[in-house]
Amino acid sequence: MTATIYSVVNALVVLLLNLLGPYVPGSGPYGPFVATWLSYLVVGGIVLAFSMVNVLVFIWWERKLLGRFMDRRGAMHVGYAGLLQNLADGLKLFRKQPFAPKDADEMGYYFGPTAYLVFSMAILGFLPISFGVSGGLVPLSLLVALALFSFAPLFIFIASWSSNNKYSLIGGMRTAAQLVAYEIPLLLAVVAVVALTGSFDINTIVGDQASYGWFALPLLLGLIIFFIAMLAEVERIPFDLPEAEAELVEGWSTEYGGMLFAFTMLGDYVRALIGSYLIVLLFLGGWSMPWGLSNYPLAGLVFFQVKTYIVFAIFIWVRASLPRVRTDQLLQIGWKRMLPLAMANIIWALALVVWGYPNIHWPVM
Amino acid sequence: MAQVHEKTIKRADPPHAAVTGIVVYPMATVAKQFVKSLWRPSTILYPFGERLENEDFRKSVKVASGAPIGVGEIWDNYRGVHALNIKTCISCNLCAFSCPDTCIEMVPVDTGSGKTKKCPEIDYGKCSFCGFCSDACPEGCLTMTPGYTITTNRRGNMVYSPERLFEVYKGKLPQNPTSLAAPENEDVILLDQDLCIGCNACSRDCPTKCIRMIDIPKPEAKAGEKLPKRIWKEPSVNDSECVRCGTCISVCPRECLYWGARK
């Protein structure tokens, strides 16, 4: 249980450095320092590759499913069933020259989307994705993940402000308003889960669900609130006001092209990936499996990924069905509906704890 | 006004409409559509996959009754690439005359017996598929077929030589028009006898060989008068065989032939 990706990589790196012996600085007085930072690099590379592969398949999944929802086929020419289409698109964007508009603030312009993508991807280093498989063992992993998750509006605002474009600025303002408004019901829904488990460690949360059943059953209201708030947090239809194509060209990423645009796009999908992960981890049992298979890391990983893709399919289903809400409706839903419901959800969760969840003794009336 | 107000109240949405009408109903509709498109999305994969032609298409997709045409159908009278029967072409030039886009050029074609004749060459980069040329053709040798696979990535490949059009003719695609239309031009070829020099150019170039040179009597020269220098023959047009192509008028060196009402 204590084995993480970091510890495995670190052991391998130390072994490699010892084998290479005196020819590399790994064995000198700075040996542990070199080994540690090499391990950080390797773990970062693993997280990067894992998130990029998942994001590319996510975009493919969205293209195919959206196509079927619209009675067409989606991407189908590059690779088998269009699987490599996103790689081709990425290659095209990668070959483009990055440049900033004349009146843009170059530092913020380049910093915004890059930090947006990096901070979104960093969350994956803290999320466990299967039994004993995580970047590092962090006792407060849920807290860290949600804290990093709420960094996004800052970078979006920096990017939109320094773009020096009215559409970008309006999109950035909307992003700030929307993400701040929906951060609160999102966190309140998480509070209910934490109240039931008494821990911020995702491993414990999933372990409790493996023992007592998914939290989606006792906390159905919390799941619905978390799902809707997550839709708004990852700026997807019906809450895609920050990049409302009909009114704001491309929203806060209007001025971006080439690889910087790819950063904004990848950031969106990494956040969608993390949103789907969090929904599965907190409410749908994570990698816990029936028939006692939970303790096999690979089987758990596959099961976890399948659940994640099903959750993302619901995201896509919502996108294919619903119209975009207005700004006033957005804030009304956030503050007037979601917030009281989230409070009610917390009270319900606390009541469950008081009644002795999971072995509930119903209070005698 | 009171009635209008009452109606407005009746038409107001029930309180649960925000969930059923805006969320549940659209999502159910889209899910139904999703299940339907799992079997077969309406995307036509031509040219990457099979194109469903008339009968197959009708079998696979239920066309609403009374619908005249479905997606993927090609009617027999669709105006696509031309078919040319080189053997019956009389080189009358009427197709090139009638073309509004000037995409038809008459080019020499080897007839096989050592001689050449002029047949239409069509540039599909210019063609608007109006069908005037096939309507004008007096012999029915230039027709239009439903063939539509003429797209290429080279401009030169858009020009179809008479031989290529003959290949289309041999491809046995349905052709239209199926019958010859009566010539729209009711006029006939008339001759200004004073200008004619009897040079035989019209008779030589007539595609249907309906012009015959007939002898005319050489008049007696009067005193002090000079007879014109000419051959004492003049053309006689067989109107029933004439296709009204106007070749004789265009080749006449003296401009003595002209269109006119039948006398």
Image: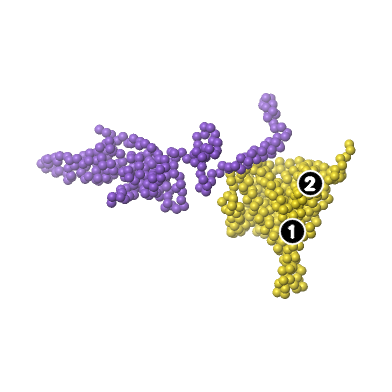
Residue A288 visible within the image = no
Q: Position of residue A132 (x, y in %)?
A: 76, 57
Residue B202, compared with residue A33, is above or below; it is: above
Residue at image x 73%, y 53%?
A300
Residue at image x 30%, y 39%?
B243
Q: Position of residue A79 (x, y in %)?
A: 58, 53
Residue B261, compared with residue A114, is above or below; it is: above
The kind of residue tagged 1 is Gly
Q: Position of residue A37 (x, y in %)?
A: 73, 66
Which is more toward the observer, A283 or B21? Answer: A283
SS for tag 2? loop
Left or right placement of residue B203 versus residue B96 in this view: left
Residue B59 visible within the image = yes
Q: How is the image coloured?
A: by chain
Give the alpha-carbon distance from disc 1 to disc 2, as whole Å.
26 Å
Q: Which shade of the palette goes to chain A?
A: yellow
Density class for disc 2 (Cα within 10 Å; few <14, some 14-19, many ≥20) is some
Which is more toward the observer, A260 or A32? Answer: A32
The kind of residue tagged 2 is Gly
Density class for disc 1 (Cα within 10 Å; few <14, some 14-19, many ≥20) is many
Which is more toward the observer, A284 or B26? Answer: A284
The quadrant in which residue A27 appears is bottom right
Q: Chain of mark 1?
A: A
Give the residue number, with chain letter if any, for mark 1: A135
Give the residue number, with chain letter if any, for mark 2: A213
